[in-house]
Amino acid sequence: MSIPSHARSNFQTLLRAAGDGNLALMECLDAVTGSARYVICAVGRDNGDYVFTPFGHLADGNPYDAYLPPDPDDPEGFVRPETGEAP
């Protein structure tokens, strides 16, 4: 499993913004559901105006329940929950 170049590039941009102190956490609304989201943004300037570039939102609830990590025994797979566990 390989991380695509656009994701690597965005991650490097996020790291630079963090290193420069140019990150913000903004409360936004999800465009589909209308639910509140807390969005990590890089902060830039354009002709004296601030520009916020969203990179992603913080996970609601327990983030360990929201994601399946890569499977260390299968480079193309993900760790799946045991039967009866969420999700």
Image (spheres, helix red, strand yellow):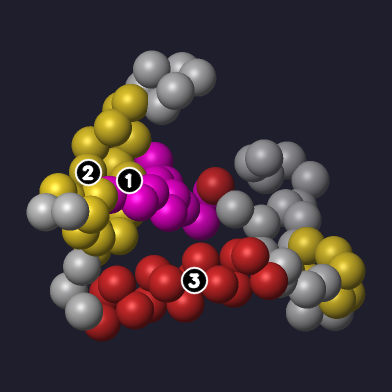
Sequence-first disc among 2 and 3 = 3
**Magenta run includes residue 59:** yes
Dot 2, crowdedness within 10 Å: few (<14), some or many (≥20)? some
Instruction: Using the numbered discs, state the Cα–Cα distance from disc 2 to disc 1 in whole angstroms.
Output: 5 Å
Q: Are marks 2 and 3 in contact (CB under 8 Å)?
A: no
Q: Are marks 3 and 1 in contact (CB under 8 Å)?
A: no
Sequence-first disc among 2 and 1 = 2
Task: Give the quadrant of the C terminus.
Answer: top right
Start-end of magenta stretch: 52-65
Amino acid bearing label 3: Phe
Res 72 quadrant in image: bottom right
Q: Quick check: 3 above or below 52?
A: below
* Residue 41 position within the rendered picture, expressed as x and y whole percent measured from the top left: 31, 54
Q: Position of 49 compared to 51: left or right?
A: left
Residue tagged by mark 2?
26
Q: Are marks 2 and 1 in contact (CB under 8 Å)?
A: yes
Dot 1, crowdedness within 10 Å: few (<14), some or many (≥20)? many
Sequence-first disc among 3 and 1 = 3
Q: Is residue 24 visible?
A: no
